[in-house]
Amino acid sequence: MDDIADEYDGKIVIAKVNIDENDQTPPKYGIRGIPTVLLFKEGAVVATKMGALSKAELSAFIDANI
Protein backbone atom coordinates (compact mmCIF):
# COMPACT_ATOMS: atom_id res chain seq x y z
CA MET A 1 0.00 0.00 0.00
CA ASP A 2 2.91 2.36 0.68
CA ASP A 3 4.16 1.92 -2.90
CA ILE A 4 0.69 2.74 -4.21
CA ALA A 5 0.50 5.80 -1.94
CA ASP A 6 3.80 7.03 -3.39
CA GLU A 7 2.71 6.28 -6.97
CA TYR A 8 -0.57 8.19 -6.62
CA ASP A 9 0.74 10.98 -4.38
CA GLY A 10 -1.15 14.18 -5.18
CA LYS A 11 -3.89 12.29 -7.05
CA ILE A 12 -5.59 10.35 -4.28
CA VAL A 13 -5.41 10.00 -0.50
CA ILE A 14 -4.68 6.53 0.90
CA ALA A 15 -5.88 5.72 4.41
CA LYS A 16 -5.74 2.48 6.36
CA VAL A 17 -8.31 1.64 9.03
CA ASN A 18 -7.81 -0.97 11.74
CA ILE A 19 -11.29 -2.45 12.04
CA ASP A 20 -10.45 -4.03 15.41
CA GLU A 21 -10.04 -0.50 16.75
CA ASN A 22 -12.88 0.97 14.65
CA ASP A 23 -15.65 -1.60 14.97
CA GLN A 24 -18.34 0.73 13.60
CA THR A 25 -16.65 1.02 10.21
CA PRO A 26 -17.35 -2.48 8.75
CA PRO A 27 -21.14 -2.37 9.15
CA LYS A 28 -21.29 1.24 7.96
CA TYR A 29 -19.65 0.31 4.65
CA GLY A 30 -20.78 -3.32 4.33
CA ILE A 31 -17.28 -4.72 4.84
CA ARG A 32 -17.47 -8.49 5.16
CA GLY A 33 -13.90 -9.52 4.51
CA ILE A 34 -10.37 -8.35 5.04
CA PRO A 35 -8.71 -6.73 3.22
CA THR A 36 -11.29 -4.49 1.58
CA VAL A 37 -10.46 -1.46 -0.54
CA LEU A 38 -13.03 1.31 -0.76
CA LEU A 39 -12.67 4.23 -3.16
CA PHE A 40 -14.46 7.42 -2.18
CA LYS A 41 -15.31 10.46 -4.25
CA GLU A 42 -16.75 13.52 -2.54
CA GLY A 43 -17.47 11.42 0.56
CA ALA A 44 -19.35 8.62 -1.20
CA VAL A 45 -18.10 5.10 -1.95
CA VAL A 46 -17.68 4.78 -5.72
CA ALA A 47 -15.97 1.36 -5.89
CA THR A 48 -15.23 -1.60 -3.63
CA LYS A 49 -12.82 -4.50 -3.97
CA MET A 50 -12.55 -7.30 -1.42
CA GLY A 51 -9.62 -9.68 -1.07
CA ALA A 52 -5.87 -9.53 -1.48
CA LEU A 53 -4.68 -7.67 -4.58
CA SER A 54 -1.28 -7.51 -6.21
CA LYS A 55 0.20 -4.07 -6.79
CA ALA A 56 -0.72 -4.34 -10.48
CA GLU A 57 -4.31 -5.35 -9.66
CA LEU A 58 -4.66 -2.52 -7.15
CA SER A 59 -3.26 0.02 -9.62
CA ALA A 60 -5.65 -1.20 -12.32
CA PHE A 61 -8.59 -0.99 -9.88
CA ILE A 62 -7.67 2.56 -8.90
CA ASP A 63 -7.07 3.66 -12.50
CA ALA A 64 -10.44 2.28 -13.58
CA ASN A 65 -12.25 4.22 -10.86
CA ILE A 66 -10.59 7.62 -10.58
Image (cartoon, rainbow, N blue to C red):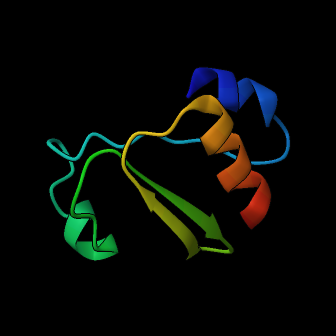
Where residue 30 sits: x, y (%)? 28, 73
In this picture, residue 60 sits left or right of residue 1:
right
In percent of the image, x 79 and y 29: which residue is there?
Answer: 7
In percent of the image, x 27 and y 64: which residue is there?
Answer: 31
Where residue 17 sits: x, y (%)? 36, 43
Let me know if residue 20 appears in the view. Answer: yes
* Snapshot quadrant of residue 25: bottom left
Image: 12 above or below 31: above
Where residue 59 sits: x, y (%)? 71, 42
Which of these two is toward me, 13 or 61?
Answer: 61
Q: Residue furthest right?
A: 10
Quadrant in which the C terminus appears: bottom right
Which of these two is toward me, 16 or 49?
Answer: 49
Image: 52 above or below 31: above
* Snapshot quadrant of residue 18: top left
In percent of the image, x 20 and y 72: which residue is there?
Answer: 27
The number of callouts visible is 0
* Snapshot quadrant of residue 63: bottom right
Where residue 16 sits: x, y (%)? 43, 39
Quadrant in which the N terminus appears: top right
In this picture, residue 19 sits left or right of residue 5:
left
Image: 58 above or below 63: above
Let me know if residue 66 appears in the view. Answer: no
In percent of the image, x 58 and y 62: which residue is there?
Answer: 39
